């Protein structure tokens, strides 16, 4: 690894850079904090990124549905939700209510008590994968020409609120001293009756993205006066839901009840246990037990127990029970996903003979993967960038056997690389295009994807809701291969599907023996095991550029992208990607993009801050980002060229869904690579560094990596001592509780 002495200006001819332009969701604008990656990141979500001085909305945040409207929250997965609810409707009838509550709350309370006392099985309370297997889909007997039914599940944008609803909400907001700019997002989130909802329960404003508890408290005081207080049940219920939503942004699908109680104490709630109990009774959150009976986690804890320390009163040597709280949408998704994966495992033809194809594989690891896929309905495959050739070989082999095989990737860049590796443009599609019906093989009469083998690359980027929708779209007998690099940052959405599948030992796991080549591959491989080693880079593949402060970091970065890398490495500025820790700060993506635009494409920003030729990322929906270039703008909106496809962003969506992209966060860059990358580490970025962050950022460059280094020993310390932040999920125990597939 080549380094310049501190304080000495680096030789421009010796400066390298790494490109890592991957579209990603909105991240936190907090200096020195890791980006959230939009829907959620396990590497840290800083609440301080949101203004606490008034009711403001994060313009980059997606509109989130109200916590009390589970149906609306799962609108993006309508087909999946209908199937899950149909299975729940087939369960046993309602259970008698308790004594102190009435209506749905009493039903819920009585149900939980019945399960805890042993009067009813857990399956009588909530649907569980052990008791309610997913509906079986029969794979088509012959590869007939597929259809593309209009009911293919898509990721629709939230329905816009009517002008009347927005106007009504604006009136209520004005009474409570909230800005009128929140009217439309509040109406979109809470529905046409939003004004009435806010009058009855002002804390429902917390369901609007960007609103914080202290802001909702001020709004409630203005509307209710002395009628409200810190222990108002409406407030505590909204806070519990908000805490779970914030946890989802950090990747969790559930939270320990004790964590929720501690967090509530920080918001002046006098009796956090009672608050949790009330939230469970009202159906704001669901309660689960972890560690007793994974097959029946749904009905394991009664609301009173959720408000007390798990394990209190345990008899004998029984281990304490961990009580988890979760939102309905993620509970349903995890249970459906576990069911679906079990269905694929059990319905696969296990006697297939792909020996000849395996023998002809280009590498031993590729042959091992082909043999594993021949005998299993679900296979996990892990490896670095070079290992992507192995799933490509599997796709080619399966297609050679006459099977309908295809691979998906997280980004358009990944799709192009997979297409090149397979040698067939019909064999690769982005995951978003596959699920929306924009690309892929189409669907059969039952709505299942017309596939025999599906390989999902970049599997660590799969969140639990997307994974559930994908698996629900596969017919019985379809072989599913989840492939990815375990060292990279996790999904932007909640869940850790790839890691949970591997940890649960739910299927064969093929670990690639193909190392990433060159100095960058050697450097990244060391980071993966916690070592930041010095590597030989005779071709200046890796260069370290020391800087003293953030101002110098921005200056050196612009110099690298505009001058040094094109001249010394031969990679043009358009193929170089800058990656930094967060959006905010003096050397975050916002500051770097402003400096890079001034140098590479100066202009007045006459189209909402953009000019023709600007590099941008477009976020059409939460969790999905597309890189592009600004072409023009008119009354219809901002016209972009996204990998050759024309895209028009309406004027009212430009501010929230389009950003400059000369500089990206590591979460945004995951799943993509560039010929060169420049990773910027200013001094205030130290607290945002972790091993997965460094691994992801440093591995985005194919030919060259420059590290603008201003964090001193924080970098090797992060690689050695700061592993991935754990995510609390339920998928692993759900998978472990499933019956072992019949070996026959």
Image (cartoon, helix red, strand yellow):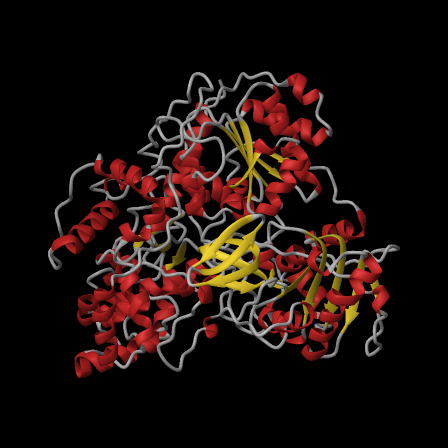
Q: Where is residue 93 in the image (x, y as percent from the top left)?
A: 16, 39
Q: Position of residue 591 (x, y in %)?
A: 61, 74
Q: Where is residue 337 in the image (x, y as percent from the top left)?
A: 41, 39
Task: Give the residue drawn at x 86%, y 70%.
Answer: 11
Residue 559 is drawn in which quadrant?
Answer: bottom right
Q: Can residue 525 be seen in this view?
A: yes
Residue nearest the viewer, comparing 99 with 106: 106
Q: Where is residue 642 in the image (x, y as percent from the top left)?
A: 55, 52
Vertical order, 666 against 46 (above or below): above
Task: Give the residue drawn at x 63%, y 38%.
Answer: 418
On screen, residue 410 versus residue 318, left or right, reads right
Residue nearest the viewer, comparing 712 with 142: 142
Number of numbered labels in the structure image: 0
Vertical order, 679 against 461 (above or below): below
Residue 124 is drawn in which quadrant?
Answer: top left
Q: In which quarter of the image is the N terminus?
A: bottom right
Residue extending farthest to the front is: 634
Residue nearest the viewer, comparing 31 with 741: 31
Residue nearest the viewer, comparing 74 with 126: 74
On screen, residue 596 versus residue 255, left or right, reads right
Task: Give the residue drawn at x 36%, y 48%.
Answer: 76
Q: Can residue 268 be seen in this view?
A: no
């Amino acid at each position: 690894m080549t380094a310049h002495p501190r304080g000495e200006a680096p030789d421009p001819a010796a400066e390298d850079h790494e490109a890592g332009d991957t579209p990603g969701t909105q991240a936190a604008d907090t200096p020195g904090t890791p980006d959230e990656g939009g829907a959620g990141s396990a590497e840290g979500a800083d609440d301080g990124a949101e203004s606490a001085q008034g009711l403001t909305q994060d313009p980059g945040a997606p509109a989130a549905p109200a916590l009390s409207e589970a149906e609306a929250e799962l609108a993006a997965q309508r087909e999946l939700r209908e199937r899950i609810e149909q299975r729940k409707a087939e369960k046993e009838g309602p259970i008698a209510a308790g004594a102190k509550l009435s209506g749905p709350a009493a039903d819920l309370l009585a149900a939980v008590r019945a399960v805890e006392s042993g009067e009813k099985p857990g399956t009588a309370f909530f649907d569980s994968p052990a008791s309610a297997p997913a509906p079986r889909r029969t794979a088509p007997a012959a590869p007939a020409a597929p259809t593309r039914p209009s009911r293919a599940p898509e990721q629709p944008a939230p329905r816009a609120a009517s002008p009347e609803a927005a106007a009504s909400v604006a009136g209520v907001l004005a009474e409570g001293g909230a800005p009128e700019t929140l009217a439309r997002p509040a109406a979109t989130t809470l529905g046409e009756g939003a004004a009435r909802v806010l009058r009855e329960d002002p804390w429902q404003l917390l369901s609007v993205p960007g609103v914080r508890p202290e802001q909702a408290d001020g709004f409630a005081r203005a509307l209710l006066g002395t009628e409200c207080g810190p222990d108002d049940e409406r407030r505590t219920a909204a806070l519990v839901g908000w805490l779970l939503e914030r946890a989802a942004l950090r990747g969790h699908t559930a939270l320990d009840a004790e964590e929720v109680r501690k967090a509530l104490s920080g918001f002046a709630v006098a009796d956090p246990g009672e608050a949790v109990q009330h939230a469970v009774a009202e159906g704001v959150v669901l309660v689960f037990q972890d560690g007793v009976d994974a097959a029946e986690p749904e009905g394991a804890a009664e609301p009173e127990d959720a408000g007390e320390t798990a394990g209190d009163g345990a008899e004998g040597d029984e281990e304490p029970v961990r009580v988890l709280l979760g939102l309905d949408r993620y509970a349903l998704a995890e249970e459906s996903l576990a069911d679906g994966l079990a269905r694929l495992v059990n319905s696969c033809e296990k006697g297939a003979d792909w020996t000849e194809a395996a023998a002809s594989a280009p590498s031993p690891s590729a042959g091992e993967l082909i043999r594993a896929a021949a005998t299993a309905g679900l296979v996990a495959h892990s490896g670095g960038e070079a290992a992507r050739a192995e799933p490509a070989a599997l796709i080619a082999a399966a297609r050679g056997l006459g099977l309908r095989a295809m691979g998906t990737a997280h980004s358009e860049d990944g799709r192009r690389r997979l297409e090149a590796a397979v040698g067939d443009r019909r064999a690769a599609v982005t995951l978003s295009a596959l699920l929306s019906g924009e690309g892929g093989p189409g669907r059969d009469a039952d709505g299942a994807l017309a596939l025999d083998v599906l390989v999902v690359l970049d599997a660590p980027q799969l969140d639990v809701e997307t994974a559930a929708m994908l698996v629900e779209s596969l017919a019985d007998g379809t072989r599913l291969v989840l492939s990815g690099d375990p060292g990279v940052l996790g999904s932007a959405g909640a869940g850790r599907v790839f890691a949970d599948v591997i940890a649960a030992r739910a299927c064969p796991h093929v670990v690639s023996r193909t190392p990433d080549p060159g100095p960058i591959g050697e450097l990244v491989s060391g980071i993966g095991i916690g070592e930041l080693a010095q590597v030989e880079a005779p071709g200046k593949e890796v260069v370290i550029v020391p800087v003293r402060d953030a101002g110098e970091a921005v200056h050196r970065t612009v110099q690298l992208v505009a001058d040094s890398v094109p001249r010394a490495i031969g990679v043009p500025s358009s193929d170089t990607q800058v990656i930094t820790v967060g959006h905010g700060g003096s050397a975050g993506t916002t500051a770097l993009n402003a400096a890079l635009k001034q140098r590479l494409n100066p202009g007045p920003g006459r189209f909402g801050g953009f000019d023709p030729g600007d590099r941008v990322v477009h976020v059409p929906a939460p969790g999905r980002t597309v890189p592009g270039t600004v072409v023009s703008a008119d009354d219809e909106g901002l016209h972009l060229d996204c990998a050759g496809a024309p895209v028009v962003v309406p004027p009212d969506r430009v501010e929230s869904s389009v950003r400059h992209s000369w500089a990206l966060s590591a979460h945004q860059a995951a799943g993509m690579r560039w010929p060169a990358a420049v990773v910027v580490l200013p001094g205030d970025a130290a607290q945002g560094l972790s091993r997965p962050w460094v691994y992801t950022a440093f591995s985005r460059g194919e030919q060259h990596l420059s590290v603008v280094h201003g964090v001193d020993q924080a970098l090797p310390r992060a690689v050695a001592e700061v592993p991935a932040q754990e995510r609390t999920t339920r998928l692993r125990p759900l998978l472990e509780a499933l019956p072992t597939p019949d070996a026959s």
